[in-house]
Image: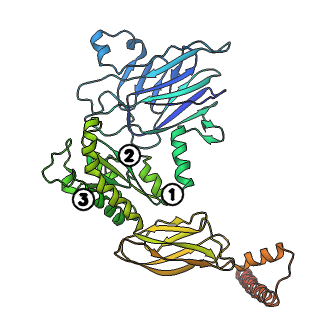
Amino acid sequence: MALMNWHLQSPTIMRGRMFGQSISLAILLCFVEVSTSFKNGTVESNGTDTAFSDGKSFSNDEKFNKTKEEEQLMVPELHEKKEDTSKPGEFPQSVGIGVRLEDEDEYDGAWCAGLEDQEQWLQLDSLRLTLFTGVILQGRNSIWSLNWVTTYKVQFSNDTETWSPCMNGSQEAVAPETRAVINWMQDIPFVLSANLHGGELVVTYPFDCTRDWIPRQDTPTADNDFFRWLAAVYASSNLAMANPDRRICHYEDFQQHNNIINGADWHTVPGSMNDFSYLHTNCFEVTVELSCDKFPHASELPVEWENNKESLLLYMEQVHRGLKGVIRDKDTKQGIANAVVKVAGLDHDIRSAAEGDYWRLLNPGEYRVIVWAESYLPAARRCSVGADLQPTICDFSLTKTPQERIKQILAKGGKLPQDEQLRLRALRMRKLRVSTKILNRRREQQQRNSKAKRK
């Protein structure tokens, strides 16, 4: 369950987009009138009848007139009583959405959108000026399905046409823990990372989310070979994973995959740290499911440590595999921050840190590396990565573009050198000749068209 507090003084309609397929309960804690109604493309309601996009429906009147047996099958709804701190005209109220638990229900009573995309939403119309104070989502695991809502956005509108995201100051509202981790990962140039989970024995690597939102599909990154190497390093040295006689944790035998798997090929997870790290930072990250027991007893922790100690050390050593270097200004010798480092043939670029230093994880081989930065001419060179566990030094010196040189000279009140003046004059004459030729061709074409019309 996640609680996020947003204080919206004026919206009359609030809409939440769910990035996932199923959810058992969506609760909007807000100040609203008792006669709140739900309506939208996913949930249609006129205040008395609610239909869900997967075909399930129930009457709001029926919902409060059930037998005890039926009530036991309903997903519980939360109506939290709070101290009345509302202003005149405001009504404290919590609103819950639940669905009936039915036989052979693939989602075990959870609400499921009809389409598997990011355009599914629930809409609440508060019918008057409303102060929304928070949103709670209660997820529900199913033994039949691995799909559930993992992230969501909340938008508001006063006319149902123009929708704006709920803001927390100047930023779109996200959980403070999420924002803190994002800032932390973007402020520090991490190179290699792993997040540790429990409940399985397998190492997963990105991407974790499928491209078409299907439940599972192999979705590799441009660095798939290196990610498979990272995962194999950990899995092959983990005492529990490497044991050929171990039992499977649940229902899937990962030993047939050497205890590694593409995350999306196991089950799609939108918005994972693995995917965020790869797409928005320089860091490579995998997920380690390091124990069948999600909550091991304290007495078992020494064994778990022994199972994973060597794996952790070997995994950390892989940070020294690949290229590293410093990108400097050719004239000042100062490091260039935020320079782009591209490896030919790999569609994944990284950027240099504040002092111009960079690190690029790569498997052994020879690579053509291209570097460029704003106001500088690009540079390229070939760099060879060896099999030894030590990075290859591959430094770059970039030269400022002629335009940037001129700007700097003029900004200091200086005059251009004679050779620069002659070169600029030659460039202007060349441009003038080219533009003159283009104009002459256009005139000739227009004259030919005029003669053809007269005939």
- In what element is the residue under mark 1? loop
Q: Is residue 180 above or below residue 204?
A: above
The residue that disc 3 covers is 236
Rendered-image quadrant of the N terminus: top left
Query: Callout 3: few (<14), some (14-19), or many (20+) C-alpha neighbours within 10 Å?
Result: some
Q: Is residue 175 left or right of residue 304?
A: right
Residue 50 shows in the view = yes
Q: Residue at x 32, y 62 (%)?
A: 228
Number of marks: 3
- In what element is the residue under mark 2? loop
Residue 162 shows in the view = no
Q: Is residue 136 above or below residue 453?
A: above
Give the percent coordinates (x, y) of residue 124.
53, 26
Query: Between disc 2 and disc 1, whose residue precedes?
Result: 2
The residue that disc 2 covers is 269
- In what element is the residue under mark 3? helix
* Residue kind at label 3, given as amino acid type: Ser
Give the percent coordinates (x, y) of residue 233.
29, 61
Rendered-image quadrant of the C terminus: bottom right
Q: Which mark is residue 281?
A: 1
- Observer-side mark, 2 or 3, equals 3
